[in-house]
Amino acid sequence: MKDAHIRFETATDKVATRITKMRPSAVRMLFAAATRPDIISLAGGMPDVSLLPKTAVRKAARAAIDAQAITLQYGGTNGLLETAQVFCDIVRDVGIRHKPENVIITTGAQEALDLIAKTFCDPGDIIITEGPTYLGALQAFSAYEPEVHTIGFDEEGMRMDLLEAELERIGKGNPRLKFCYTIPNFQNPGGVTMSPDRRKRLIELSHEYDFIIVEDDPYGRLRYEGGHCLPMRALDESVIYLGTISKMFAAGLRVGWIMAPPGVTAKINLAKQGTDLCGSMFDQKMAAAYFTETAWQHTLQKFIKTYDKRRRAMMDALEEFFPPEATWTHPEGGFFVWVTLPAYVDANSMLAEALDHGVIYTPGDSFYPDGKAGRNCMRLNFSYPSPEDIREAIRRLAEVIEDRLELYRAFIKAGAISE
Ligand SMILES: Cc1ncc(COP(=O)(O)O)c(C=O)c1O
């Protein structure tokens, strides 16, 4: 018999192939560095929960404590009906009509992503996403071993010409094609928003090529300029719509939701039973109380004002410090800016120098399924640091980029590499 230590070592040999294929999240690894006081982090994606009024938080927590017979007990897999009703009321403002009985409350939108892939994907099935896309979605999907096909975007969101060409290649009626996952508002990591025309076109294509649209909308309420765009779920009831309280209230409470047609809801419910039986009733009750018993709309305006100031600080600093070779997106809301550097700059290897200069960001390759594309890109977050820190971080980062560019300019001049 092997001794316990050897057994512990060799147990990793038994790990499933899907786990060995998973890449660790660069963002998680960066969290350790982000806590150093000399580092300004543009790497995360955290809401600034210090903006929440303590009285509102206390009121919501009190409501959850007072209902302990419900909130400290197991609940139904779909979650608290009361909370589902609150989410249906919230999305009615943006044009979505949905019945609370057909809502599944999830442990954050992150669990929703896992459940969607668990419900729809066999190994080798095809998922379409924006490229780059939310790395947590890529991580969740990868456990079910799909083929992820990425489609580039511009300032109007996912490019429909590229999508149509890809759909032609996949073929009409291909049973392996399951869904298109998109973040139409202030995309993570791109910061771009899908135009109303492209939303309509995507819906048409979903019918023509027979795939589901999964619309992930964590940032929709955080718009700092421009007019509101209707969610695709408001235009077509076959769309699966994902929401979360993480950016409007509290990311630590882990409450999100899935709004899907009733037949699909029943299947996702089966998938969720095996995952966690039910989500946290305490968190769900707190969420319901926050959105019914406090002035949450007022607090949301406070979030919007604060994040807008930080977004402007980032846009101004990029203009002031970044070299002319760099380009970046101009988000009208959300948390992120996507920066593209000349093709010869590797943002991944540059991170170590950035850390030495006291700034970190998320390298672009983290947002692609194979980690091969996006190497000359980076995602910058503006929701968390102060405007002063953002300016200083961009100044430091510009220095690091300038060093790289100088090196490459010298190589190019010497004819050692081509532009
Ligand atoms: C696009 C997107 N979807 C889902 C999530 C997960 O959110 P939650 O905190 O609700 O799990 C995030 C978190 O940053 C996100 O950016």
Image (cartoon, rainbow, N blue to C red):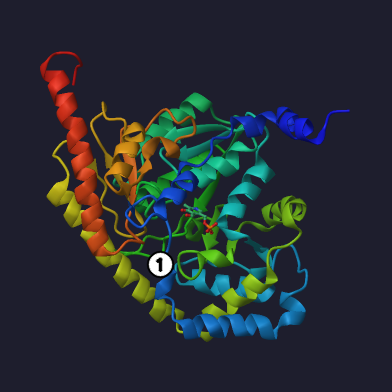
- Is residue 292 in sight in this rendering? no
The spot of residue 6 in percent (x, y) is 76, 30
The spot of residue 92 in percent (x, y) is 50, 71
Q: Is residue 400 left or right of residue 168?
A: left
Is the residue indicated by label 1 positioned so its CB lies within 8 Å of ligand 1? no
Q: Is residue 77 left or right of residue 24?
A: right
Q: Is residue 411 above or below residue 150?
A: above
Snapshot quadrant of residue 122: top right
The spot of residue 123 in percent (x, y) is 66, 31
- Looking at this view, name the residue that lies furthest to the top: 415
Residue at x-position 69% and y-position 71%: 281
Q: Is residue 306 left or right of residue 100?
A: left
Q: Nearer the viewer, residue 252 or 334?
A: 252
Residue at x-position 51% and y-position 57%: 233
Q: Is residue 275 left or right of residue 286?
A: right
Q: Nearer the viewer, residue 140 or 19?
A: 19
Q: Quadrant of the N terminus?
A: top right
Element on which disc 1 rests: loop
Q: Is residue 292 above or below residue 35?
A: below
Snapshot quadrant of residue 160: top left
Q: Is residue 142 above or below residue 53?
A: above
Residue at x-position 40% and y-position 78%: 299
Mark 1, residue position: 48
Task: Name which residue type carries label 1.
Answer: Asp
Residue at x-position 76% and y-position 55%: 273
Q: Quadrant of the C terminus?
A: top left
- Looking at this view, name the residue that lies furthest to the left: 413
Instruction: Give the crowd class for mark 1: few <14, some 14-19, many >=20 residues within 10 Å.
Output: some
